Amino acid sequence: MMRAGALAPVSFGSCSAILGARFMQAVSGPVLETIGVSKRFGGVQALSNVDFACRSGRIHALLGENGAGKSTLIKIIAGVVQRDAGRMLLGGEEVVFATPREASAAGIGCIFQELSLMPHLSVADNICITDPPRRWGFIDGRAQRHIAADALARAGAEDINPSAPVSSLPLSRRQMVEIAKSLARDPKLLILDEATSALTAADVTRVFKVLKRLREEGLAIIYISHRMSEIAELADDCSVFRNGQHVATFPAGTKSNTEVVEMMIGREYSHAFPPKPKRDLRGVQPALETRGLSWESALRDVSIAVRPGEILGLGGLDGQGQMEMLLALFGALSGVGGETLVEGRPVTLASPQSAKACGIGIALIPEDRKTDGLMLPMSVRDNLTFAALDSISTAGIVSSRAENAAVADMVKLLGIRMGAADDAVGTLSGGNQQKVVIAKWLLNKPGIILLNDPTRGIDVATKQELYQLLRRLADEGAAIILYSTDYYELIGCCDRVAVFYDGQIVRLLEGDQITERALIASALNISTADQGDVLLGEASL
Amino acid sequence: MSELVMQLRRHTNPAVLTASGCIVALLIAGSFYSANFLSPNYLLQQLQVASFLGIIATGAMIVILLGHIDLSVPWVVTLGGMMATAAAGWWGDLGAALAIPFGVACGALVGLINGIGTAYLRVPSMIFTLGMNAVVQGLVVVHTGGFAPQDRATEAMHDLATERTFFGLPNALLLWAVLSAAMIFLLTRTTLGRKIYAIGNREKAAYLSGINTRAVTLICFVISGAMSALAGVLLAGYATKAYQAMGDAYLLPAIAAVVLGGTNILGGKGTYAGTIVGTILITLLSSILSVMQIEEMGRQIIYGAVIIVMLLTYGRGAKTQG
Amino acid sequence: MSRLRYQLLEHRGTLLAAAVFAALFLVYISNYATGLNAAVATTVANKGVLLAIVAMAQTLPILTAGLDLSVGMVFVLANCLASELVVGGPLQTAFGIVVVLGAGLACGLLNGLIIVYGRLQPIITTLATGAIYYGLALWLRPVPGGDINSDLADAVTGQLPGGIPAMLAVLMAVVLLVWVPFRNSVTGRAALAIGSSETAAYMSGIPIARVKIVTYALSGLLAAIAGLLLTFVTYSGEASSSIGGTYTLNSIAAVVIGGTSLMGGYGSAIGSIFGAFALRTIGDLLFVLDLDPLWQPLFQGMILLVAVSLSALRLLKIRNRLDLFS
C-alpha cells in the first residue's frame, strides 16, 4: 500500500473503492471490535474479558492508570502480544495477528510510546521501511524520498529533511517522523499511545490538526494520553479502564473531569496538590546557586539559587535548556562555564560521582527511568541500594542486614507495591519503577534533589503520591529543582518557577504569579498578558 | 514460602543444573567404557587439568559480566609463562623467587592497557583486546627471537602446577578453589560485584547513579589479565617449560565454559558456580573424547554440537522483544 | 545541497578507510624497489582479495548487530572442499565450484537457522559451528594436499589484458553480484534496520527471521568464495585452525577499520574491503622498509591498536558525557 499518489491529503477519500466500501459498512458496524478478550502475564491478569469497539470517523480515547490494561489492549490489537481468550473482529471478520507485521498489513497503524524508529537509517528509509518503492526489484531512492516528503507534509512536518538520519533529529522531530511513518501506510485504524508526550506544544497543535482531518476522512483513531486537556479537545468517545477491566464507555463531554478520575482510580479524587507553606526564605543561604552558567549553545548565562525547603520549578517549552541545566548541575556535561556553589562554597562537578559526594549531596532523577534510572533485569533490592552502596557496606563488603533494613524502610516510606525484593525491577508498574528510582536516591539523604520530568507516563494516583513526597522532602530541608513539561504540575508544586527560553531564564515567577497564563506567555517569550491570552488557544494546554 | 525455599530458588538455575547433569551423565557413560572414569585418581587429575582452564575462565567471566570480552587471552597466557621463566634467567635466584608474581604482574599490566583502551578510550573491547593480543604476540616473538631466553619453569612453578602438598589434593586445584571462593565472595557480597553486574546491565544508569564505571571496568580487565597470566605460569610449570602459542587452545574453551555455565555473553547476568561447572564439563568432555581415541575431527564436531545443544536447552533468548 | 552532506556523512567510514589504504599503499609503493608494475599489483591483489572477501562476509552479520566467528572456518572448509572437487575438465570444475559455494551457503544457512530459531547469541553460536566446520575440513583433508584445476587457477591469479590483476576483477564481480544487490534490496535495508534497533524493526513489521537467515547465509557464501580463491592461490587445501582463526580475527579488524560499527546498523562492505587491503599493506610495509621480520607481528599489532585508538579522538568532542554510553 505504498503508492505516492495515495499520500496526498486530498486523495484519501478516493483512495480505493474497496476502502470506501469498508467505511460505508463501518457506519453500521464498528471498524474494530473485541469480545471477551483476556490476557495474563505470569501472575498478573492484565486484561479480563474486555469488550471494546471503535468506529470509523471517530477519535476514541482510552483512559486509565498505568497498569489498567490500556497498553495491553492495544498491543493485542497491534499484534505485539497475543490474547489468551476472546475474539477480535476487524470490519466484522475475525482476525488473529501473530506479529505487528500482520496487523500492519491488515491496516492497523500504531504509534507507540517507545519509538519504533531505526536511528541509523534516514527519515525516508524509516518511513518506507516495510514496503519501499522498487524499480527492477531494488529500492528506488528518489521515489522513496518523494513518498517520505509527502508523508511528512501530511503529518505537518515539512521541515524535516527526508535524507537526514533519524539519529540527528531531536526527540520531538523523531516523534513527528513516527507519525508520518504510520500515516504513509494508509491505515484504517490508527492507534496513538502517549504519542504526544515528547512533542513541543507547537507540534501537538499540528498533530491535532492532522488527527482531526483524518477523522474527517473516515479513519478510526484510538488515542491514549495522560493529559486530560488533550482528551477533552480531541476525543469523541472515551473508554475507562481499571485493573484490566473495561469500566465504562461514554461520549466525550458527558462526564466531568472529577467523575472520570474517580472512575480511573476507583475511589474519591482528593485534592491533587499539597498546600504550599508560606515561608520567607530570603535571608537563608542557598543550598545550590549558579552564577552565569553556560554550556555550548544550550545554556546561556543562567543564574539561579534554590534554598533548603524550597521547590524551584523549571518551566518553558520543551528543549529550551532545562534538561541541560539539570545535567550540568549533576556533573554530566563537560566544558560548563560559570560558577556553581553548594552551601556557598564553589564546587567542581566533573561527574555524577562528584555531584553525589559534594557537600550536602546532589541527586538526579533522570528523564527516562528505563534507560537512565534503572537496571531493569536486576532485582528491586539491587536497584534500590545501588546509589547508596557505601552506606550499607564496610570496606566494600555489603551488609545484608543493613541492606534489607534500608530496602524495607524505603518500600514503606514510598509505598512501593511489589512482590519480593528479589524480583526484577522491570516487573513493576511504571509508577512503582519511578518510586524505586526516587527511593534509590533518597537513601543517600541528598540535600539537593534534581528531578527531570518525573511524572511523565505515570498514573494519577502515583503522581499525587509523588507531589506529597516532594513537599514533605522540602519541608524536611531539601532543596528541590523540578523540571516538568506539565504546567499544572509547576503551578501546583513549585514555590518559584524559572521559565527558560532559548537557553536563558526569561522570567522568574513567584507565589501567586505562577499562573497558566504567565507560564505560557513567558514560555513563548511574550511579555504582555494580552498576547498571552491570544496564544493560549493555539498552545492547546 | 520460607526463606530457605527462596534462597534455594535464587541459587539454583537451569544452566548449573543442566550442566551438572551432563557432567554426571558423561561420567556414567564413560564408566561403561572404562571403570577408570570413576576412580578418584582420574577425577582428581581431571580437576587438576580443569583448574588451568578454570582460572582463565574466571578472568573471562568477570569481563563478560561487564558486557565486554577479552580476546587477548591466548598471548597473555603465553606471556605469563614466558615472563615467569624469563625472570629466573634474568635475575638468578632472586628472579626465581619472584618468577610467579612477576609473570602475573606482566599479565595484569596488559590487562591495565586493555582496561584503559576499553574504559577510557572507549574502543570496543573486542577489537582493542584483539589488537593487544597481536602486540603481546609481537613482544613475545621479539623477546624469544632476539636472544635465547630461559624457558625452564622454576621449581616453585613446577610444584604449584603438579605437586600435591595438602591432603593429596593437587596444588593447582587448591589454588583454583581459593580463587573461586574469592570470586564468589567478590560477585555476591561486595560493592564491586554489584557494580559489575550493574554496568553489564546498563552502564549509563550505573554512571548516573554516581558510580565510577571506568574504574570498575579497568579493575576487571586487570583481573582478567592477571588470571590469564597466572594460568600461563601454571601451564609452564605443568609442562616444565614455556613455549610460544601455549595459550592458543584456551580462549574459545574459556568463553564456552563461561557461557555453558549460564552467563549471558552480553553481560549483566550469570553465576560463578555456573562457570565452575562449565569448566569441568568442557574439560571432561575433551578428556573423554581423547580417551575414546576419537580423532581430532570428530572431537571438534562433537565439541561444537554439544555447546549448541546445551545452549538450546537453557540458553535461549526471549521469544519476542518489546 | 544538504542531501549531499548527508550522503557524505553516511559514507564517511568508507571514505576514511579508502584514504587510509591509499596513504599506506603510497608509502609502500614508493619504497618498493621496482615501483608499481603489473607483477607487484598482482601480488598485492592476490594477498589482499582473500581477506577482503572474508571481511565482506563478516560485514553482513555485523550490520545486523551480530557477528560470525565461523567465517574463517567456512573459508578453510571451502578451501579443503575445493582442493578435492575443483579439478578435471571444465564440466567437473564447474560442478566443483557450485558444490563449494553451495556448501558455504549451507554453513551460513545453518548459522542463521540456529541463531534465529534457536534464539542463541550469534557470537557463541558461530564459535560452536566454527568448530564443527573445522572438524569437517579435517575430515576432508587430514593432511594438507589436494589439487586444483591449474588452468583456472593460473587465470584467476594472473593478469587480465592490460596488466590488471584478475583477482581484482573477481573482487569487483563479487561486489557487483553480491553486495550491491544486497545493499539496494529490501532485505539489505531490513538488515541495517535490524542492526540499528531490532525492537523498532520488529514493531515496523520487518520479517526479522527471514532477513537474518539470508544475511548469515550470504556471509557463508562469501566466505566460501574466498576459500575457493585461496585454493587458486595455494593450489592445495589445508585444514589449519590457525589460518581459520587468523582470518576470522583479521576480518573483524578489517570491518572496524572499514568504518562499520560493531554495534550494527551502520557501515558498508566496501569500507571493509579497503580495511582489509590496509591491513595487508601494513604487513607488507615492514618488508619494503627492510625491518627484521621478527618485528613484524609487533609492528602490525601496534598499528592496529593505534588505528582503533584514534577513534578516541571523537571523545574530545563529546560535551555531554552521557553520549559516551549511546
Image (cartoon, coloured by chain):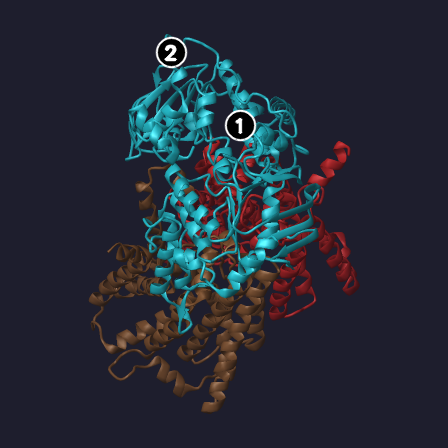
Residue type at tag 1: Ile
Tag shown at residue A438: 1
**Which chain's colour is cyan?**
A
Q: Secondary structure at mark 1?
A: helix
SS state under label 2 = loop
Residue A377 x %, y %:
59, 41
Q: Which residue is identified by label 2?
A: A285
Along the viewing direction, whichever of C174 and A306 lies nearer the viewer: A306
Q: Quadrant of residue A298?
A: top left
Mark drawn on residue A276: none
Q: Position of residue A312 (x, y in %)?
A: 41, 21
Query: Would residue A319 be found to the left or right of residue B175 on screen?
Result: left
Residue B147 can be seen, yes or no: no
Residue B44 percent across, percent down from the top left: 70, 51
Q: Quadrant of residue B309?
A: bottom right
Neighbor class of circle 2 (other Cα within 10 Å; few <14, some 14-19, many 20+) is some
According to the colouring, which chain is red?
B
**Which of the pair A496/C131 is nearer the observer?**
A496
Q: Residue at x 43, y 81 (%)?
A: C235
Residue A413 in percent (x, y) is at 61, 22
Up the image or down, C8 lies above or below A134; here it is above
The amino acid type of the residue labelled 2 equals Gln
Of pointers 1 and 2, the one earlier in the residue sequence? 2
Nearer to me, C144 or C235: C235
Q: Quadrant of the N terminus of chain B?
A: top right
Compute the Cα span from label 1 to label 2: 26 Å
Q: Residue at x 47, y 26 (%)?
A: A489
Q: Mark 1, residues whose alpha carbon is within 10 Å: few (<14), some, or many (≥20)?
A: many
Please say if B271 is above or below C260.
Answer: above
Q: In the rendered structure, the residue with mark 1 lies on which chain?
A: A
Chain C colour is brown
